[in-house]
Amino acid sequence: MTKNPLLQDFNTPPFSKIKEENYKPAIQKAIELAKEEINSIITNTEAPTFKNTTEALDYVGEKLDRVTSIFFNLNSAETNKEIQEIAKDISPWLSEFKNDMILNENLFARVKAVYNQKDSLELTPEQDILLDKQYKGFARNGANLNEEDKIELRKLDAELAKLSLQFGEHVLAETNSYELLLTNEEEVAGLPESAKEAAKLLAQQKNKEGWLITLDYPSYIPFMTYAENRELRKKLAIAMGKKGFQQNEFNNEQVVLDIVRLRHKRANLLGYKTHAHFVLEERMAETPEKVLDFLNELLEKAKPAALKEFKHLEKYAKKLDGIDQLQKWDGAFYAEKLKKELFSLDQELLKPYFKLENVIDGVFEISNKLFDLQFEEIDSIDKYHEDVKSYSVTGKHGNFISYLYADFHPRPGKRNGAWMTSYKSQQIKNEVNERPQVSIVCNFTKPTETKPSLLTFNEVTTLFHEFGHALHGMLANTTYGSLSGTSVSWDFVELPSQVLENWCYEKEALELFAKHYETGELIPMEYVEKIKESASFHEGMQTLRQLSFGLLDMSWHAGESPETITSVKEFELAAFENTKLYPDVVENCMSTSFSHIFQGGYSAGYYSYKWAEVLDADAFEYFKEKGIFNIEVAQKFKNNVLSKGGTEKPMDLYVRFRGKEPNSDALLKRAGLINNN
């Protein structure tokens, strides 16, 4: 056991030493250690105090957190069959351990004793939040239930953990198993050279002749945007849309229904009307009613614009190619053509100015100008894959801030999309400020034999988005790990990520990094103007799409009788009724691959992207008023948002930064949905 690298003391993860067989014994041992730590709190003969109970409990399970963060991060970024099998075994253990802790009456009695004397303890705001969060963590998860109900809760949690994993595995399996091999050059007509080259390389790697298109986004999106062959676009779109919705071993329909019913049952057991009521109690939004009002108010403002944009796009497709009925596989293709015509802006024209390495340097320089951060690429720490880059991040006076891992390219065993995660949270313990270890994971086109990795403008904003999350993690400066970095309300967590995207549209920022990869020439300013002009292109349709996902999520989780739902597809169609633009595709269903809400943590929380957009537009308006590199505003953002984590109520932090509560006008103006005057 002592030879197990996961059980030895380490600072950064010892990736190269870890073998699959190390995980299960390490997690078992780490659970045992955490149980011993809990036991020492319970058996303490002194009266419960903030220090010997609340604070001691916050430090419980540090080894377990380190080991499981390594395991689950790799299960997303570098998985294989063996890791997936281990995940199935350990998920119920972790669920059971969490329940053992939450449902431990003696432990809860001590937490409650401290909570009951809260008003006389003279706590700091952070200590107050920690105690409140801890008490609610018990109460909201069954500590006040009777024995019979506690047993029932354990069963529900174990089953939900299993189903969530199963859902994700099915989606990944369907993504990986689909390949569209094209052998005729006419079939790839319209595709940019870079996309053709990438598709050819992909085929070669699999010992095939021709061009290989997959459901990974760097392959899928260029094909849907540029391929002239409408039938092939249709084929690919249907393949993407029927993940988890085919009559095979990876069908997710029953999984979705089971997850929704079990979540509802769990909420009822804990005294909540629905899963959404349970989730939202601890969010900025507070109630499902408030979320639905928020979504429907935006829908009312966005829908007329979306319908107008859609009719315009339909007319354009008809004029261009005689298409009578615009379908889902036509949207990106004709939108790109129209955008090019309206703004003379072609994604392919922009890509040479967005070499990945330059964009990375750009986001580093912007972080330096705003927050005095320096980034140095290092090879002195272990990495889990050769593609991963690692950096040491320091402050103005050379003080160590964080380690940063960056993993940019798709490969088998890595799930689609982009995300930020952490291998170690920041905290202050024994008067030592333990600094965080943060990671961003993306799926950008790989370099080819003739070209470096060149990003689309959307990919540039994705990188900035994830980097915004990373800044939230790296600049954390709180006492307690459970309140550190991105440990904030789910509808507040997207503010740092979304606000950073705004710099991608600003001339002053683009001049720092948007340089042609061959000539070094700065991006022409007319392109910058066009990027800004086109930023709100089809914003009505984009907003409607986001709102449709938020409303679908709320339909699944705010309804009072999910056990009456028999058809996932029919239920989904009803939820989409008010936001529908394109005709339905019979073979497709979104819910069966809606990983955000059935595998990730976004259940009853998808609205938070739009909620955070309101915050980010309002926040960036403040930067624009004072200058996008204004040190005073940047410091206020760093001191009141980025460094504070979840140590105070989000609205209090926001108001301290901004001087007022946000409203949606800045967002609606930016989106061109209301007049700028």
Image (cartoon, rainbow, N blue to C red):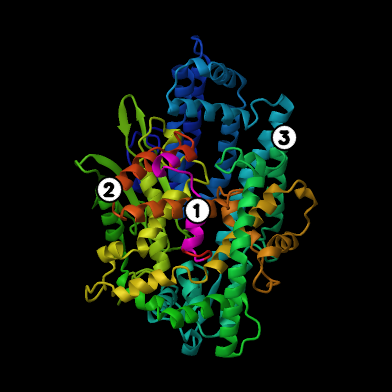
- Judge whether residue 403 can be spotted in this image: no
User: Magenta stretch: residue 18 in it?
Assistant: no
Q: Position of residue 61 (x, y in %)?
A: 46, 30
Q: Which residues fall within the magenta stretch?
A: 655-672
**Secondary element at tag 2:** helix
Vertical arrangement, residue 642 with respect to residue 170, above or below: above
Q: Amino acid at mark 3?
A: Leu
Badge count: 3
Q: Position of residue 560 (x, y in %)?
A: 75, 46
Q: Earlier in the sequence, mark 3 or mark 2?
A: 3
Is the residue under label 1 in contact with that under label 2 (CB below 8 Å)?
Answer: no
Q: Which label is found at residue 269?
A: 3
Who's the residue at 31% across and 68% down the image?
355
User: Magenta stretch: residue 657 in it?
Assistant: yes
Who's the residue at 57% across and 74% down the image?
309
**Which residue ends up furthest to the left in the rendered image?**
397
- Judge whether residue 517 can be spotted in this image: yes
Residue nearest the viewer, comparing 642 with 671:
671
Q: Position of residue 13 (x, y in %)?
A: 36, 43
Q: Dot 2 corresponds to which residue?
A: 631
Vertical arrangement, residue 361 with respect to residue 50, above or below: below
Q: Amino acid at mark 1?
A: Val
Residue nearest the viewer, comparing 221 with 84:
221
Who's the residue at 49% across and 64% down the image?
671
Q: Dot 1 corresponds to which residue?
A: 614
Q: Residues within 10 Å of mark 3 (few under 14, many from 20)?
A: some
Q: Earlier in the sequence, mark 1 or mark 3?
A: 3
Is the residue under label 3 in contact with that under label 1 (CB below 8 Å)?
Answer: no
**Secondary element at tag 1:** helix
